[in-house]
Amino acid sequence: MHVHTCENYDRLSAHAAALVAADVERKHDLLLCPATGSSPTGTYRDLARRAATDPQLFRSISVIALDEWGGLAETDPGATTGYLKEHLLTPLGIPTERFTAFDTAADPATACGRIRAQLERIGPIDVCVLGLGVNGHIGFNEPTPSLVPHCHVARLSEESRRHAMARAMKKPPEFGLTLGMREILAARHIILLVTGDGKQSVAAKLLGKEVTTMLPASLLWLHDHVDCLVDMALL
Ligand code: GLP
């Protein structure tokens, strides 16, 4: 894992957007797996700015969701899907045919099975943009004594249920749907964004380099091509 210290959130976002854009320049039809949440919103804003000046750049990329909140109403398009449409798909001009989302209308285990099968067809992921949960989770791979390798339904930790996206929902979700660590670690390039209130302690643990399932993000130390962008405010 290559750790970059960034002066502030805007610098971190600009750096991450530049890394993604450079990957797209090298491979125009790459597969992007983007996290949601406050960590990557600035990155997607900067990618949208790039798309405004270079509308052809993102023309051929495909996107697959990293995770989704569980228990949404059948008619609900999904919190992750809604976020990605607003911040990424629409600004970058990515049509729905090139976006794979968790099917919120299906039984959750079936929806995960479909994502796993789709990833086996179109994967591996070329570039995965991750945020770090306050408890060290990535996607909804929560700290637990053992992790599930493939896409699965995950019981959410209290920290995840207190996430701003969950608090905005009528009923706090009990479970989430998420890519597993194996699918994340199979990505060719991973960009981990370490930024946000209350993450000082988890950032320090991650940078301590101990690899443990009780801090799922620490498994990224086992991958050869991870850029970890850390907001200096956390150090
Ligand atoms: C959420 C999502 C993750 C996200 C993480 C951090 O629960 N499952 O995909 O990356 O927590 O969120 P934030 O960037 O808002 O701190």
Image (cartoon, rainbow, N blue to C red):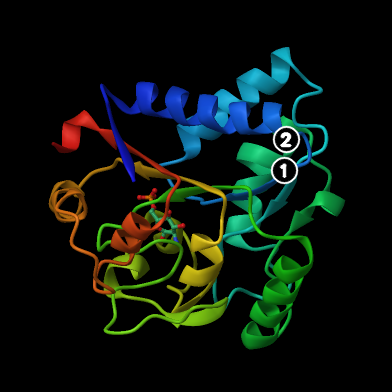
Relative height, residue 228 to residue 67 (above, below): above
Which residue is pictured at 71% across the width and 17% down the height? 52
Which residue type carries mark 2?
A: Lys
Badge 2, how many Cα within 10 Å: few under 14, some, many 20+?
some
Relative height, residue 218 to residue 3 (above, below): below
Query: In this rendering, would 75 be left or right of 231?
Result: right
Count of all numbered marks drawn on residues in the image: 2
Q: Quadrant of the C terminus?
A: top left
Distance from label 2 to label 1 (Cα)?
6 Å
Pinpoint residue 110: horizontal percent, then vertical percent: 70, 86
Badge 1, how many Cα within 10 Å: few under 14, some, many 20+?
many
Residue that label 1 marks: 30
Which residue is pictured at 51% across the width and 50% down the height? 36
Which residue type carries mark 1?
A: Leu
Pinpoint residue 9: horizontal percent, then vertical percent: 33, 28
Asked if marks 2 and 1 touch (Cβ < 8 Å), the reply is: yes
User: Can residue 24 be spotted in the picture?
Assistant: yes
User: Can residue 104 be spotted in the picture?
Assistant: no
Which residue is pictured at 56% across the width and 55% down the height? 187
Residue that label 2 marks: 27
Q: Secondary structure at mark 2?
A: loop
Relative height, residue 63 to residue 90 (above, below): below
Q: Residue furthest front?
A: 224
- Comparing 211 with 45, the one in front is 211
